[in-house]
């Protein structure tokens, strides 16, 4: 019997858990009750003989993931003062009084630009990418623990999130470091499998106590905590129990998890995000064969089933938040990029619209327009049995207070070689069902912007298109304001640098942030209601399948000592607000000796 079939067999019944996440649970194993003997008669199937297997959480980890690494630092570390020597910006933002003779072009402030009062900005992380402490205090495994330990081809150089940045124990220092630069907001995600080690069942109070302190530490330092409920780390048990996001069962499990978090932290958090980038985590389906329980949904349909249930889960969580009197904004985080027709042909225009419909529109139209999919996407979804009932449409419509978009880049779009109509009528076409092509090379043959690292080929510094992108969002999906909920850049080949002085000077990322902030200022000056932005990321981290090779961090992390160092791009990002924010940028720190 192959592993995935054995997993399905083992986990098909329920696991009963005690309040202690390390307590023993019971697994009942049973197959079909009868089988056919060699003489043709129906007899009892020996595989149906039932037994009870008792496993604790550690054994569950060992069985499905295997051994995990632990850090040398495994208790919460109290913060130390950030030395003033670390807070000196690099050239050309600042020149020391000695030596003299430096020259740089004078850049005059544009007096028509401003980040209005109440505009919030900050930095972001995600639990699996930074926390480490994989098994600490009752955390259960997620699908990403299996991806990185057993389906190792998903990550470069077999990297895992076992230790990561050790943020689980160093969060106090990390919050102190961003406060020292005057950063007023920190966007985190909560690990679902810390709160519910098996995704459902008993609540792990140790995990809640940990996030209590993370949120309270933010408040202590004058940093707004922003919280994402789900950033891709699905509890493993739910995937093996019913297929995770492929089953509508996940809607109620996600709602139960959301209820616990909303009740616990309520109005301590000013901005909530239910799910992060559903189009990305849904594109992980079908999951690697042999590592998870089998599902019967055709592979090409799976990501769309995932998206359908993600929308329902988001909507249900939104209504729970409002029923509990949550005063902060609630939304989900979409992602993609501005879509530019490669030519002015009608075919490229049609293909570009389909690209919008099969990306942002897939999730935005139901929430911000009418509760249903855009027309071209709806045709496809209906053909595979995915339709919202009228009651579901009413529940979904209007379930976001703002429009949150992880808007990193832009691309050109064009029609398939055979044409859009021919592609739509041919399920064997490799571009079906979307039936659009994309390229980062424009009609003149030039790249749309500076290239990023070799392991993030999807990303170019296309900041020129940001104002048009923000206008499009406001005109197409009206909301209470737009938040650029993630944006950032991977400096090319940064992982090859060995000198700290070389690493922390990151000119392409610095230029990206300078140009991006100017683009947001342009959009605001043109009437776009941009209310916030969150830079990715607070520090270098596990960039999912790229492992630790690709770096988006505004701080460098030494993965041996866990020391953090500010990069030049961090000062560039903060400087935009020192110059243009109506609200003052106030560093909070105690100078070091």
Image: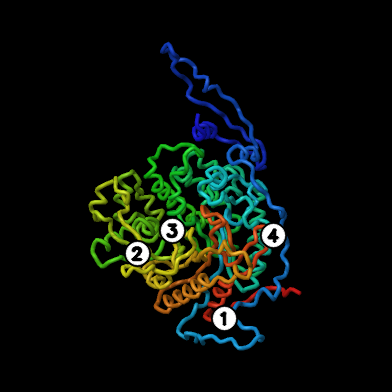
Q: Are the two marked residues, 2 and 4, in contact with CB atoms closer than 8 angstroms?
A: no
Q: Are the two marked residues, 4 and 1, in contact with CB atoms closer than 8 angstroms?
A: no
The number of numbered badges drawn on the structure is: 4
Q: Which residue is drawn at 45% across and 72% down?
A: 530
Q: For numbered disc 3, what is the local secondary structure?
A: loop
Pointer 4 residue: 561
Q: For numbered disc 1, what is the local secondary structure?
A: loop
Disc nearer the start of the sequence (4/1): 1
Disc nearer the start of the sequence (3/1): 1
The percent coordinates of residue 520 (x first, y second) are 45, 74
Pointer 2 residue: 412
Q: Of discs 4 and 3, which sits in the foreground?
A: 4
From the viewer's perspective, is residue 482 above or below residue 261?
A: below
Disc 4 to disc 1, how far (Cα)?
30 Å
Pointer 1 residue: 92
- Quadrant in which the C terminus appears: bottom right
From the viewer's perspective, is residue 213 above or below residue 184?
A: above
Disc 4 to disc 3, how far (Cα)?
44 Å
Q: Are the two marked residues, 3 and 2, in contact with CB atoms closer than 8 angstroms?
A: no
Disc 3 to disc 1, how far (Cα)?
45 Å
Pointer 3 residue: 399
Q: Is residue 344 left or right of residue 521?
A: left
Disc 3 to disc 2, how far (Cα)?
31 Å
Q: Which residue is drawn at 45% across and 48% down?
A: 284
The percent coordinates of residue 141 (x first, y second) are 59, 45
The percent coordinates of residue 104 (x first, y second) are 54, 85
Q: Nearer the viewer, residue 107 or 295?
A: 107
Question: 10 Å neighbourhood of mark 3: few (<14), some, or many (≥20)?
Answer: many
Q: For numbered disc 4, what is the local secondary structure?
A: loop
Q: Nearer the viewer, residue 20 or 243?
A: 243
């Amino acid at each position: 019997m192959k592993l995935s079939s054995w997993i399905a067999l083992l986990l098909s019944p329920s696991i009963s858990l005690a309040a202690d996440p390390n307590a023993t649970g019971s697994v009942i194993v049973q197959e079909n009750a009868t089988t056919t003997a060699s003489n043709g008669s129906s007899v009892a199937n020996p595989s149906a003989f039932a037994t009870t297997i008792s496993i604790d959480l550690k054994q569950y980890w060992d069985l499905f993931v295997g051994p995990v690494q632990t850090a040398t630092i495994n208790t919460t570390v109290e913060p130390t003062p950030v030395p003033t020597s670390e807070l000196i910006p690099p050239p050309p933002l600042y020149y020391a009084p000695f030596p003299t003779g430096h020259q740089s072009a004078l850049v005059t402030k544009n007096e028509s630009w401003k980040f209005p009062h109440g505009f919030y900005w900050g930095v972001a992380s995600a639990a699996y990418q930074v926390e480490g402490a994989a098994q600490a205090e009752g955390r259960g495994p997620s699908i990403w623990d299996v991806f990185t330990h057993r389906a190792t081809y998903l990550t470069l150089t077999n990297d895992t999130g076992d230790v990561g940045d050790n943020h689980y124990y160093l969060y106090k220092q990390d919050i102190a470091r961003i406060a020292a630069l005057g950063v007023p907001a920190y966007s985190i995600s909560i690990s679902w499998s810390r709160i519910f080690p098996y995704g459902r069942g008993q609540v792990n109070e140790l995990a809640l106590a940990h996030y209590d302190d993370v949120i309270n530490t933010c408040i202590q330092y004058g940093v707004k905590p922003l919280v994402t409920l789900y950033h891709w780390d699905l509890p493993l048990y739910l995937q093996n129990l019913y297929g995770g996001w492929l089953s509508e069962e996940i809607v109620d499990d996600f709602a139960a998890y959301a209820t616990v978090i909303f009740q616990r932290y309520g109005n301590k958090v000013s901005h909530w995000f239910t799910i992060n980038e559903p189009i990305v985590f849904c594109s992980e389906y079908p999951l690697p064969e042999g590592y998870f329980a089998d599902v019967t949904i055709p592979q090409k349909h799976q990501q769309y089933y995932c998206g359908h249930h993600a929308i329902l889960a988001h909507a249900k969580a939104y209504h729970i938040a409002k029923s509990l009197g949550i005063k902060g904004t609630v939304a989900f985080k979409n992602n993609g990029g501005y879509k530019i027709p490669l030519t002015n042909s009608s075919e490229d225009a049609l293909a570009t619209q389909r690209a919008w419909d099969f990306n942002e529109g897939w999730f935005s139209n139901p929430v911000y327009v009418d509760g249903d999919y855009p027309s071209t996407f709806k045709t496809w979804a209906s053909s595979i049995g995915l339709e919202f009932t009228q009651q579901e449409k009413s529940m979904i419509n209007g379930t976001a207070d703002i429009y949150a978009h992880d808007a990193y880049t832009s691309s050109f779009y064009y029609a398939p070689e055979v044409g859009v109509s021919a592609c739509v009528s041919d399920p064997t076409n490799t571009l079906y069902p979307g039936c659009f092509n994309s390229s980062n090379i424009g009609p003149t043959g030039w790249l749309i912007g500076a290239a990023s690292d070799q392991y993030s080929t999807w990303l170019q510094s296309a900041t020129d298109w940001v104002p048009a992108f923000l206008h499009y969002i406001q005109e197409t999906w009206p909301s209470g304001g737009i938040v650029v909920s993630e944006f950032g850049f991977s400096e090319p080949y940064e992982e090859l640098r060995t000198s700290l002085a070389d690493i922390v000077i990151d000119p392409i990322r610095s230029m990206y942030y300078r140009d991006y902030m100017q683009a947001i200022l342009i959009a605001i000056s043109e009437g776009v209601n941009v209310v916030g932005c969150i830079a990715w990321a607070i520090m270098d981290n596990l960039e999912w399948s790229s492992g630790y090779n690709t770096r988006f961090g505004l701080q460098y992390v030494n993965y041996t000592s866990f020391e953090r160092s500010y990069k030049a791009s961090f000062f560039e990002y903060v400087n935009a607000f020192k110059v243009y924010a109506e609200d003052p940028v106030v560093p909070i720190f105690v100078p070091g000796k």
